Every structure is written in C-alpha cells, then in structure tokens.
Image: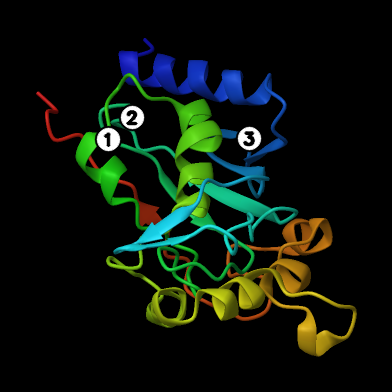
Amino acid sequence: MANPSKRRIETDVMKMLMSDYEVSLVNDSMQEFHVRFYGPAESEPLVLGHKTLIEMWIAPFAGGVWKIHVELPDQYPFKSPSIGFMNKIFHPNIDEISGSVCLDVINQTWSPMFDMINIFEVFLPQLLRYPNPNDPLNGEAAALLMRHPKEYEAKVKGGGTDLAHQEYVQRFATKEAADAATDGNDEEDQDEEMSDIGSISEGE
C-alpha cells in the first residue's frame, strides 16, 4: 500500500530520528516534526562585492539554538520540505516574524537525491554562514549587513551581561527559548508562514 513517496518520507525521517539531532514528531506524524538546530561554529571570510570581511566574520550565530518546524509534502522528495525557524533569528534571508526561509539555491537545485540530513548538515549551516543580502526577506538585516557589518554582527550575537547588549542569539536563541517556541513563535501571536524551499523543477 505504501507508495514510493511515503516510503521515502519514512526512511528520511527515521534517519533523522536515529541521528544526533533532537527530533520530535508533531502528533506522531512522519510529515511534521521539530528539529533542534545549533548555529554553525565557524565561517569562512564573507565577501560582499569587492570587500572581504575577514576580521569581522567570526560565526555570529555560533552558540545559538533554534527549533525548526519541518513539514514534508505528500509529493516529497519530488517537492521539497517546508521549514521555518520557530524562535527569533536576525538574518537577511529569514523572515523575522514568520521564520520563513529564503534559500534560492535550493529553490533552483532541489533534487530527490537530497534528504533531511542534507538540509540540517549542509543547507541551513551554509545559509547562516553565507547570508545573501541581495535577496532579503529581512530588509533591515540585509541593509545593516551591507552598510555596517560590525553592527550587524553585534545585533546578531550581542555581548555583555546587561539586557541592552544581549541581542538576538543571547536573547532568543537559547535552549530555553527553543524549547518554549510554539508555532506562533515565542513572543507574539504570529501567522505560521513557513518557507517552501522549492519544488523540483524536473518533476517528471
């Protein structure tokens, strides 16, 4: 009775459950679940136009913890998953309110050969390491990164113990914030609007 898509969903979700990632199914569904995701710890120099920001770009998302909401469509893996950050993140390609993600490269190149492990081990870490301010979902973050990269880094990760210097990672990307995050985000009643990473263009 199981069709190829259903078998593939079960296989990929089981791989996630057996991995080092913390995964919790929503209503025992294999097609909807949450994953605890940690910010990548290192980054290569970021190039913006002709400028290489070597000394600044020291993994501003390192130490952050996010709860990621994942939904797998019935057509998976021929149609890509939808994902959303459930606790806040300040990033040019992630909507601050809804948590939806803009991943143009995946939109263009998604293939049934990819799986959920690829998303959490490669695609999301790459997104945090190499933001694309030229294609933003968060215009404020994109503008700040382009014009004042040191201020962007400070706003992302903060520093110090007083609240004024505790920015997004310290305030919203803690283990406690991730655990408390709900589908409406952790602080406000917001529409759940997850990103459609993209449908396979060669779906025939």
What's the amino acid at mark 3? Asp
Q: Can you give x and y, in whole percent of width and height, for residue 116 in the image?
A: 48, 30
Dot 3: element: loop
- State the residue position of label 3: 28
Distance from label 2 to label 1 (Cα)?
5 Å
Q: Can you give x and y, in whole percent of width and height, for residue 195 in the image?
A: 38, 56
Question: Going 66% across and 24% down the picture, which residue do you hit?
Answer: 17
Q: Is residue 149 left or right of residue 175?
A: left
In this view, the mark in front (2 or 3):
2
Q: Is residue 117 left or right of residue 93?
A: right
Distance from label 2 to label 3 (Cα)?
18 Å
- State the residue position of label 1: 79
Distance from label 3 to label 1 (Cα)?
22 Å
Please state which of residues 82 and 135 is positioned toward the viewer in this rendering: 135
Say whether marks 2 and 1 touch (CB < 8 Å). Answer: yes
- State the residue position of label 2: 76
What's the amino acid at mark 2? Tyr
Q: Residues within 10 Å of mark 2 (few under 14, many from 20)?
A: many
In this view, the mark in front (3 or 1):
1
Question: Going 37% across and 24% down the picture, which residue do you hit?
Answer: 114
Dot 2: element: loop
